[in-house]
Amino acid sequence: EDGAGHVVAAGGLFPVADEQAFAWTYLGRDCGPYMTGIVRAARRAIFENRNRWPIVRAAVLKDFKPGHRLIRMLGFKPMLPNEPVSFGARVYILFQCVAHGGH
């Protein structure tokens, strides 16, 4: 939240399989001044859940370069093969973050 109580970002980890979760985020257009805190909170959530979900995956819109930068800042790497996937009419690139000792 910003100082006025407006939500500028939301996110979480959604379990999808044993030891695997899917990361999701929504970033408001005015989130820029809060990105340091957003990145720290996301890293903390991934780190604190690494034993429960050593594999975390995420999908980023193929042409959304700020999303690609953010997901890499969080320690994610493109999944191989790095081919776009479609969900409905949108095209995404899949990323994953694997904790040490994960699959």
Image: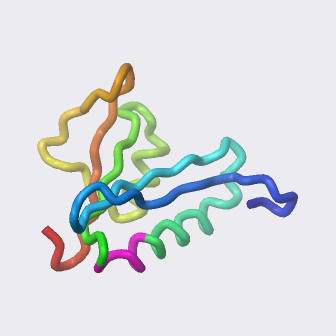
Closer-to-camera residue (36/12): 12
What range is drawn magenta here? Answer: 46-51
- Residue farthest toward the right in the current orientation of the protein: 4
Query: Which residue occupies 20% across, 49% down?
Result: 79
Q: Which residue is drawn at 34% across and 59% down?
A: 15
Q: Where is residue 99 in the image (x, y as percent from the top left)?
A: 25, 74
Q: Is residue 55 left or right of residue 63?
A: left
**Is 96 displayed left or right of 6 in the figure?**
left
Q: Tell me what residue is drawn at x 54 percent, y 71 percent.
A: 40
User: In the displayed structure, would residue 74 be above or below residue 87?
Assistant: below
Q: How many numbered marks, from 0 up?
A: 0
What is the quadrant of residue 14 in the picture?
bottom left
Q: From the viewer's perspective, is residue 84 above or below residue 10? A: above
Q: Where is residue 100 in the image (x, y as percent from the top left)?
A: 21, 78
At x 74% / y 60%, what residue is drawn? 1
The percent position of residue 101, horizontal first and vertical second, equals: 16, 79
Q: Identify the image's colour scheme: rainbow, by chain, secondary structure or one colour.
A: rainbow
Query: Quadrant location of the C terminus?
Result: bottom left
Quarter of the figure with residue 59: top left
Residue 3, picture quadrant: bottom right
Above or below, 69 relative to 89: below
User: Is residue 8 magenta-colored?
Assistant: no
Q: Is residue 57 left or right of residue 29?
A: left
Residue 56 at x, y percent in the picture: 30, 61
Q: In front: 9, or 80?
A: 9
